[in-house]
Amino acid sequence: MLLAILPAQAAPTIDKVLVHKAERRLEVISAGQVIKQYRISLGRQPLGHKQQQGDQRTPEGIYSIDWRHESPQFNLSLHLDYPNLKDRTAAYKQGVDPGGMIMIHGTPIDEEYPEWFFKGLDWTNGCIALNNADMRALWELVPDGTLVEIVP
């Protein structure tokens, strides 16, 4: 009965998600402090900013989580609002399609390739991937609309 009287611990307000591509690290930041860190995998071509569809690079810049999806292929997914205006302008000037469907997602659920197979590999088509347990934790912690900064 005493537990009913105690106030529920409020979930922290998340300021942003910061992705350090070179370190393969995703940080969840609240009140300017890192409250969680996760190991990540990137696109097969991890160096440099995404230029166009199919280049298998992970974008760099400021984005936000605009929707989420439970996927049979990649478990849980948080969609980023890539391409932003800067990305679309650069692609237009180059005469290319900037691509899209950049997600933060889990690893595939596949009997041929168990989750451990992906550890330490850059294997996505430009997305940011976490193991499924970490993805579940991130999914529950980070609301839609959260700012995502991706730095080299």
Image (spheres, rainbow, N blue to C red):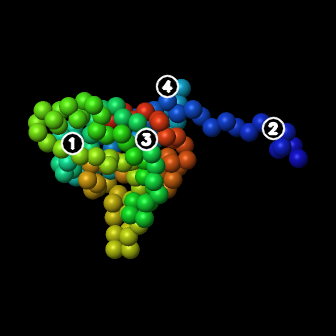
Amino acid identity at mark 2: Leu
Q: Is residue 143 above or below residue 55?
A: above
Q: How many marks?
A: 4
**Marks 2/1: CA–CA distance:** 51 Å
Look at discs 2 and 1 and give the one toward the viewer.
Answer: 1
**Marks 4/1: CA–CA distance:** 32 Å
- Residue sitting at x 28%, y 38%: 83
Q: Is residue 130 above or below residue 20?
A: below
- Residue sitting at x 49%, y 40%: 144
Mark 3 crowdedness (10 Å alpha carbons): few <14, some 14-19, many ≥20: some
Quarter of the rendering occupied by the C terminus: top left
Tag 1, which secondary structure? loop
Amino acid identity at mark 4: Gly
- Residue 32's disc is 4
**Marks 3/1: CA–CA distance:** 18 Å
- Residue 66's disc is 3
Outermost residue toward the left in this view: 94
Give the percent coordinates (x, y) of residue 70: 47, 57
User: Is tag 3's residue or tag 1's residue first in the polypeptide sequence?
Assistant: 3
**Marks 4/2: CA–CA distance:** 27 Å
- Residue 98's disc is 1
Contact between marks 4 and 3 (CB within 8 A): the answer is no
Q: Is residue 99 above or below residue 85?
A: below
User: Is tag 4's residue or tag 3's residue first in the polypeptide sequence?
Assistant: 4
User: Is tag 4's residue or tag 2's residue first in the polypeptide sequence?
Assistant: 2
The residue under label 2 is 6
Amino acid identity at mark 1: Pro
Tag 4, which secondary structure? loop
| Most foreground residue, 10 or 116 | 10
